[in-house]
Image (cartoon, rainbow, N blue to C red):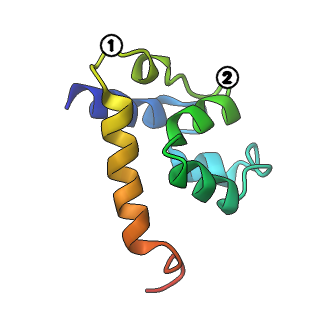
Amino acid sequence: MKALGALIAQFRTNPCGHPNSAIDSGKFTSISVTDVHAAIEKRSLLKFLQASCQGSIDLSIHLSGAFGDFETFYEEAIGGIFDGYAGDERRK
């Protein structure tokens, strides 16, 4: 739970305030939904975000093993959610 809390804190304390603000800021317009989908499918979303958002978020603690194998846990969890909902992003 500490690792998940630290991950959430990264988005709460980033310069944009929260993930939606980061999107709305226009700073990351080069990141497409397709890019994010591909990273989730490859189970590499954290590494993708770390590389794509350099200077805005720091996920190194999540990728370092400091929280055990959090990276695998997170990637599998997000991948499972994605596998269940992919293609229904616009569905209400």
Residue occupying the point 44% across, 36% down: 12
Residue occupying the point 19% across, 32% down: 1
Q: Where does the C terminus fall, quadrant-wise?
A: bottom left
Secondary structure of the residue carrying tag 1 is loop
Name which quarter of the figure residue 7 lies in.
top left
Within 10 Å of disc 1 (Cα), the crowding (few <14, some 14-19, many 20+) is few
Residue occupying the point 62% across, 55% down: 38
Measuring from the top left, give residue 80's x and y in whole percent: 35, 59
Tally of numbered discs: 2
Q: Is residue 48 above or below residue 41?
A: above
Which numbered disc covers residue 66?
1
What's the amino acid at mark 2?
Gly
Measuring from the top left, give residue 44's x and y in whole percent: 53, 40
- Front residue of 35/23: it is 35
Residue occupying the point 47% across, 29% down: 13
Which numbered disc covers residue 55?
2
Q: Is residue 90 above or below residue 58?
A: below
Q: Residue furthest front?
A: 42
